[in-house]
Amino acid sequence: QALLVESGGGLVQPGGSLRLSCAASGSISSVNTMGWYRQSPGKERELVATITSVGTPNYADSAKGRFTISRDNAKNTMYLQMNSLKPEDTAVYYCNVDGYTSYDLHFDAWGPGTLVTVSS
């Protein structure tokens, strides 16, 4: 199985920036699509951005132009650079990784989440 650990969340003022990281560890053979999702209180979890194994990104409309997703395949790590943050970006951000273990078993893993609070 894969273990995911997110980091980089915190409190930031409107207009500020944060960089989230998600590191995948364990008996991983290959990693396919990686993604960031978020969930605000009282709302369902929603897509923020995904990135394929070859680096093709896909963004939710709310993230376009402000967020940049990237990955380091050698480290099985994904990043989310968030700029021009707004109060409505406040949420718990989760990373999701799809891939295969060393035993050729498919996994679809979620991290525990990291809280991002945008407030003055």
Image: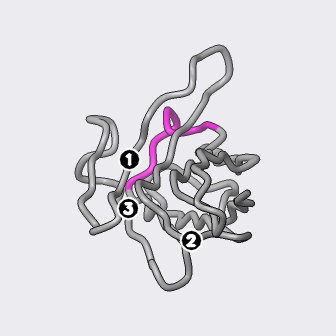
Residue 120 in view, yes or no: no
Image coordinates for residue 14, horizontal then vertical, percent: 49, 49
**In this figure, which residue is indicated by the disc labeled 3?**
69
- Label 1 residue SS: strand
Disc marking residue 89: none
The correct choice, above or below, for 93 with respect to 17 in the image is above
Residue at horizontal 38 percent and vertical 68 percent from the top: 70
The correct choice, above or below, for 93 with respect to 67 in the image is above
Image coordinates for residue 97, horizontal then vertical, percent: 54, 53
- Label 2 residue SS: strand
What is the three-letter code of the residue carrying label 3? Ile
Which badge, 3 or 1, is on the more N-terminal residue? 1
What is the three-letter code of the residue carrying label 1? Ala
Marks 3 and 1 close (CB-CB < 8 Å): yes
What is the three-letter code of the residue carrying label 2? Ser
In this picture, which residue range is highlighted in magenta? 84-91
Question: How far separated are the C-alphas under marks 2 and 1?
Answer: 23 Å
Question: How far separated are the C-alphas under marks 3 and 1?
Answer: 7 Å
Image coordinates for residue 106, horizontal then vertical, percent: 57, 49
Q: Quadrant of residue 38?
A: top right
The correct choice, above or below, for 55 with respect to 66 in the image is below
Q: Nearer the viewer, mark 2 or mark 1?
A: 2
